[in-house]
Image (spheres, rainbow, N blue to C red):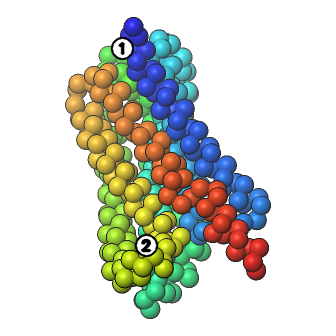
Amino acid sequence: MASKEETIGIAFLVQAVIGILGNVCFLSQHLFLYFTGCKTRSTDEIIGHLTVANSLVILSRGIPEVMAAFGLQDFLSDLGCKLVFCAHRVGRGVSMGSTCLLSVFQAITISARSSRWAELKVKAPRYITTSTILCWVLPLLLNLNVLLSLTSKQRIKNITKKVDLGYCSSQGDKKILYSVTVPLISITDLLCLGLMLWSSASMASILLRHKQQVQYIHSTGLLTSSPETRATRSILILLGIFLCFYFLSAIIQMYLTFSQNHSPLLLTVAALTNACYPTLCPFVLLTRGHSLSSVCRGYCGLNTAT
């Protein structure tokens, strides 16, 4: 029978393998469409960044957790600890920011039939590249404290105030540093959450009105869902999954930040929860109209017809 540590290691390994395969498969599709010259959606650039960020979260957290669970001790150097945790924090921030951007741009796209949104729909795609770059820069700046507070277990053995994070440790006397960065991160998270809730409510309202308007036509079977409608529904599902795991993870992280009790089990649950959304995200997109065959029918066909 497998031990407790081996069971945890297997759980992380399965999650990492499934998540990486899904994100690599989805990213490969987008690269194929790009190099073959197929017309893509304006939000596909955001989805590409989201996929890269999801892979970064899974790799930076899943692989070290697997190695630690199977008994490898002090396998990360001081620089390795800083890079792994910084990559995870930045990946998480980019994943959240990209999801927020995706929902906002999709809400603008389907809301643009009214006159007040028409001009914004034309201008919005111009800011996608700038917005995605900001999604990478802002989390990096906010998580520079990781470079100061984290270190390998080899270097922190002689320090009394420390927090055991499994394969790395954090110096326990950096509360002043965290008291500055945690509120800043919380503000950006709340801003993203507010935009997500607004965009999801807006998209849900538009879909409901659209359903009511074409209810009779749908009942006769003369109308099928448009690509934008399917894309909107998939984004709403993504938002629901993200919000569920975000609030669960936030509760655990708040407890770990302000509590002296850092149980290994709670750290394990936090790590698994953080990687759930990045693992499920590509499969939601693949099964909701973003598969290669669906995109080619909807967009490559437009290129050949023109």
The residue where tag 2 is placed is: 107
* Helix, strand or loop for disc 1: helix
Residue 229 placement (x, y as % from top left)? 46, 71
The residue located at (54%, 60%) in the rendering is 289
* Helix, strand or loop for disc 2: helix
Which residue is at the front of the view, 124 or 278?
278
Disc 2 or 1, which lies upstream in sequence?
1
The residue located at (45%, 67%) in the rendering is 232
The residue where tag 1 is placed is: 4
Query: Can residue 184 be seen by looking at this rendering?
Result: no
What is the spatial separation of the Cα atoms under label 2 and label 1, in whole angstroms? 45 Å
Name the outermost residue toward the front. Answer: 220
Q: Quadrant of the N terminus?
A: top left
Residue count near mark 1 (Cα–Cα under 10 Å), binned few <14, some 14–19, many ≥20: few
Which residue is at the front of the view, 240 or 229?
229
Residue 94 placement (x, y as % from top left)? 49, 51
Which residue is at the front of the view, 230 or 79?
230
Name the outermost residue toward the top. Answer: 1
Q: Splitting the image into 4 quarters, where does residue 169 fall?
A: top left
Amino acid type at circle 1 is: Lys
- Image side of residue 17 versus residue 203, left or right: right
The residue located at (38%, 24%) in the rendering is 165
- Image side of residue 186 versus residue 80, left or right: left
- Image side of residue 116 versus residue 42, left or right: left
Q: Is residue 222 above or below residue 129?
A: below
The residue located at (76%, 65%) in the rendering is 37
